Image: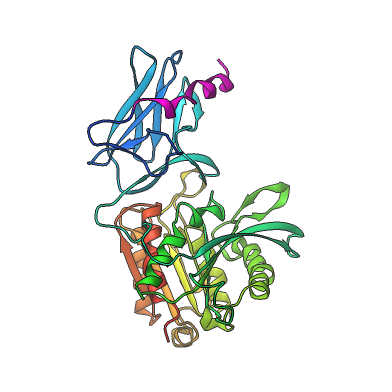
Amino acid sequence: MNKASLLWMVTVTCCLAQPGDGARPASTNVPGAAFPALDAGNRAIFQLKAPTAQKVHVSLPQGRYDLAKSEDGTWSVTTPPLEPGFHYYTFSIDGVSVNDPGSHAFYGTSKDSSGIDVPEPGVDFYSVKDVPHGDIRSKWYFSKVTNSWRHLNVYTPPGYDQNTVAKFPVLYLQHGGGEDESGWAAQGKTDLILDNLIAAGKARPMLVVIANGNMPASGGARGGGGYNRAGMAPFGNELLNAIVPFIEANYRVLPGSESRALAGLSMGGGQAFFVGLENKEKFGSVGVFSTGLFGGIAGRGGAAPAAFNAEEQMPGLLTKAKAFNESLKLFYVSVGEQDPRIEPTKKAVADFNARGVRVEFATFPGGHEWQVWRKSLHDFAQRLFKP
């Protein structure tokens, strides 16, 4: 059986019976799709109809779960409780990996994947509320750096179009490896986080620029280029010589490093570390979320990561701590408490503090995943652009 046949079979997912026992369709479903569903204990119910399939399972970051087949050809499974946050998943039907037509597709892990957003009790900072809302604007720009058209997303705060005189500070916010500029706009809920913070008076109205950090490489490959200065340099060139000039020519933004911040998650955190700290005359605040730069992740072939040497990676960071502190308003580091990067990150932060480098450090429950990064942005944005 070919993949096209398999895809045709599962397109009826949205027409199956509604979930029972108080379960409700996931917020990430396409309109009208009943499954996947979540019950009160955040157990996920996956269901699809594939009458001729012999074996079906669903893969999530938490594990792989086999679906059981009923007499009418409907396959289903109820998972153990899932951790709150956003999770990519895929179905396997007789060995062929397919997305769930009941779910929206999200770009992550270097491909479009199904996703399920699991709510966290008592957490609503990224929920839609009755507050003024800003916009996420999809923009194309021509880069003279890469000699190509490139795409980015720009969050503008509520009232941007009405008040045509006001100028705003800018946060440049980068995605992780295997993702692109859609991540912070979709999975990250950037607009809702900023809308709610601004409405509550907890953050200054600001622009957030979400650019594509994947840079062309030899052979047409895409990626961040490695966790080192040379690997991050191509994005730095693009940011400084194409993205920032485009934003400052087309949007009402405040000048000066005190009104520019650079932050990112994982690969984007490495970009923020190198590009931001090497260009403190351009960026007065730097946020590093869940980066592998400090260690805690295996290298190629399972090799242990090289020990992080802050002075070697960023000359003057430790030996000229006073000058570093004076040139940067905010240096922020965060990581998930179940992320294997946490202990190396804690060690790096302890070394910074011991040498007099002023760093604001935060941890959040979770692994290397979007709930941690949403909380990181929520926390970081409240610290930015203070008088």
Start and end of the magenta stretch?
A: 1-17
Reply yes or no: does residue 213 show up in magenta.
Answer: no
Residue 261 lies, in percent from the top left, at 51, 74
Horizontally, residue 292 falls left or right of residue 151, namely: left
In-front residue for pair 104/309? 104
* Foreground of the two, 69 or 359: 69
Q: Residue at x 63, y 63 (%)?
A: 235
> Which residue is pictured at 49% across the width and 73% down the height?
206
- Quarter of the rendering occupied by the N terminus: top right
Residue 200: give x, y in percent of width and height: 34, 72
Q: Residue at x 55, y 74 (%)?
A: 162
Q: Position of residue 253 (x, y in %)?
A: 58, 78
Give above or below for 22 relative to 286.
above
Residue 245 in the image: above or below residue 125: below
Side (left or right) of 1 relative to 250: left
Seen in the picture, residue 241 relative to 61 is either above or below; the reply is: below
- Is residue 180 visible in the rendered structure shown here? yes
On screen, residue 256 versus residue 369, left or right, reads: right
Q: Quadrant of residue 103?
A: top left
Most common secondary structure along the magenta stretch: helix
Residue drawn at (43%, 75%), measured in percent from left and top?
331
